[in-house]
Amino acid sequence: MLKRKIGRLGYEGSVVMFGAASLGDVTQDEADQSISFALNHGVNHFDTAADYGDAEVRLGPIISEVRNEIFLATKTGQRTKEKAKAEIYRSLERMKVDSVDLLQLHAVGTIEELDKCTAKGGALEAALEAKEEGIVKAIGITGHGHQAPVTHLEALKRFSFDTVLLPLNYYMYSLPDYRAAFDELMAEANSQNVAVRVIKAIAKAPWGEQQERNYATWYEPFDQQEVIDACVHFVLSFPGIAGFASAGDIHLFPKIVDAVERYGSVNNEEAERILSSISGYTTIFGSPTSIA
């Protein structure tokens, strides 16, 4: 399993993160099988959130047993210090652990949400207090949507976050405004040695209204191995990316791991050929507005 340093934290994390977004939608036995598959294939980077239903509960039984062998990240979607602090303690209890390696302020994809988190009495204060207590080792920020790069760039000017987590895939990077904003964020993150981790690597499009939803993702994912290979190649060959989160559906996870294990078998030209020729490939975040 390919590993890369998680920014200034120095931890050698698997480049594919076990994304637990939909783990709460499966049984405990199914969750255990998927987590065990990840561990058996060298995945040591697990990313969940308090907002992911019972995902933290599903992680708990196995994760608590291998806590010292993995990098464990969770998120709080609360915006006030009081509520965020309570949620952090709740996450530890649900996962049966004493601490997490990374606590992220969740879904901060606009300046308005950033303002709430960084205001006096905001969630950032809870994260800092938790770090002082030793139950959180590092602090990050995450965001969805087309405004995420601009928002996270501003976030890095306000506070020295250890990590950022935001969307990146071939289609989104083809949008001129998103590309410019993402590149600017990458430059600043690199200058601060902030780990850039990405999501939605294999997202294809929003689900159609009449379309059968075969996967536990809120968007239509790619599921053909050749296309997944190209998507994984794109994000992993991107300079400065520490890793990417797998799509939440446990049935897609083995295909994603397979693509990572064969990283290098697809070259840039082949990935470009595959991804540029896909019909219906678009952004899952609605029509992009001006990002500047």
Image: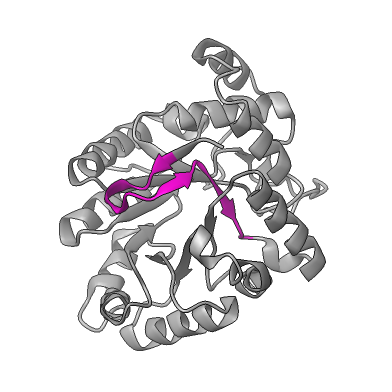
Frontmost residue, 150 versus 239:
239
Q: How many circles with numbers are drawn on the protein?
A: 0
> As drawn, which residue projects farthest toward the top?
269
On screen, residue 141 versus residue 224, left or right, reads left
211 up-or-down from 105: above or below: above
Residue 7 located within the stretch drawn in magenta: yes
Q: Position of residue 249 (x, y in %)?
A: 71, 52
280 up-or-down from 242: above or below: above
Give the image quarter of residue 95: bottom right
37 up-or-down from 184: above or below: below
* Residue 280 visible in the displayed image: no
Residue 125 located within the stretch drawn in magenta: no
On screen, residue 160 versus residue 234, left or right, reads left
Image quarter hosting the C terminus: top left
- Which residue is painted at 26% across and 69% down in the image? 115
- Which residue is painted at 36% across and 72% down in the image? 136
On screen, residue 148 versus residue 89, left or right, reads left
Q: Position of residue 241 (x, y in %)?
A: 39, 37
**Magenta span:** 4-21
- Which residue is painted at 35% across and 52% down in the image? 164
Give the image quarter of residue 76: bottom left
What is the basis of the colouring in this image? one colour
Q: Position of residue 47 (x, y in %)?
A: 52, 59
Q: Position of residue 66 (x, y in %)?
A: 58, 64
Image quarter hosting the N terminus: top right
- Which residue is painted at 32% across and 79% down in the image? 130
* Residue 76 visible in the displayed image: yes
